[in-house]
Amino acid sequence: MQVDMETAARISLLQKNVEKAIKGKSHVVRLAVITLLARGHLLIEDVPGVGKTTLAHSLARSLNCSFKRIQFTSDMLPSDILGVSVYNPIQKEFEFKSGPIFSNVVLADEINRTSPKTQSSLLEAMNESQVSIDKETYPLPRPFIVIATQNPLEYQGTFPLPESQLDRFMMRIRIGYPQIDDEKEILKAEWPGSPCSDLAPVLSVEEVLHLQEMVDTVRMDESLMDYILHIVGATRSSKNLEVGASPRGGLFLMKASKAMAVSRGRGYCIPDDIKGVAVPVLAHRVVVAGRFNFYGQRGEEAERIIQDLVESVPVPL
């Protein structure tokens, strides 16, 4: 498959459609689109009211595919997400009733408000795109992406995501407050309902799958693979970090870099592709030294450390 500017134009169309609802955050939207193209999952972590749910919802509405939103609560059970077997008195056998996880785009809203038992029900789905229930394995639809949101500042009634769960997310992004001009546009819009309610699909399921296959064909020179390994290795030897990035972090960094290259109309990677995604791919996988292992360390400090490490690793010529 040949990656060209027409491919980049299709991706740009998707991004611009999402930006109709998310004003002034083109870089954030691009990272969300790249996660989709790289077959990853996305964690959006920020304060309330900045558009976390809107970003996830607008991305789903821009694709002509199935979408389910799950509002996570403390009393939610794994069966509420995965599904349950129900006895059919006519057939005299149990039938599996699928849950909301069987969708192309799954919005896990406020994922840290449910118990670790329920959080762990997503592990197999996110890692292997399948669900195992009652000795049966059910494949999930393709494409498949989990977009989770959480508030990093609120502690009461929440359950911090364990490291194994965090590691399943390809990227963790923060939206941040809008610039004053962009916020003024938000005030002027006066949407009667949700800001993404009027969005129309711009890509079909087949087109998304085709773009994902294109990402797989992107060439990455061996020197760039070594560059990725040196960045990941730097997180493990840094005195500012107690725990560095996992091998999955390096793999996700490579996949995200390839997706970045495709979004720019290239069939090969360059160092800037890796630099452009290194922070959102790696920052949530590390533990900052001397800090209590909770939300704060995965914020700006972790991102700053990763950015410094990326700048310190020599770029291959």
Image (cartoon, rainbow, N blue to C red):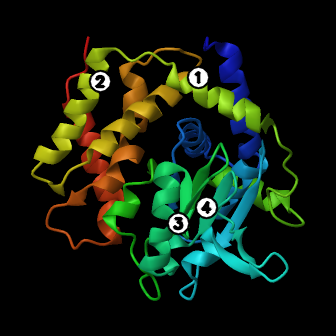
Front-lying residue, 20 or 62? 62
Q: Is residue 313 above or below residue 18?
A: above
Which of the two discs, 2 and 4, sits closer to the camera? Answer: 2
237 horizontally vs 169: left or right: left
How would you rate the neighbour count of disc 4 (Cα within 10 Å): few for under 14, some for 14-19, many for 20 or more?
Answer: many
Q: Is residue 2 above or below residue 314?
A: above
Q: CA distance from mark 3 to mark 2?
A: 39 Å
Q: Would you name the residue on which mark 3 appears?
A: 135
Given the image, on which type of amino acid does mark 3 rest? Lys
* Numbered disc 1: secondary structure: helix
Who's the residue at 60% across and 31% down the image?
Answer: 212
Total labels: the figure holds 4
* Numbered disc 2: secondary structure: helix
Who's the residue at 73% across and 30% down the image?
Answer: 207
Instruction: Inspect this view and state whether residue 259 appears.
Output: yes
Given the image, on which type of amino acid does mark 2 rest? Met
Given the image, on which type of amino acid does mark 1 rest? Met
* Numbered disc 4: secondary structure: helix
* Numbered disc 3: secondary structure: loop
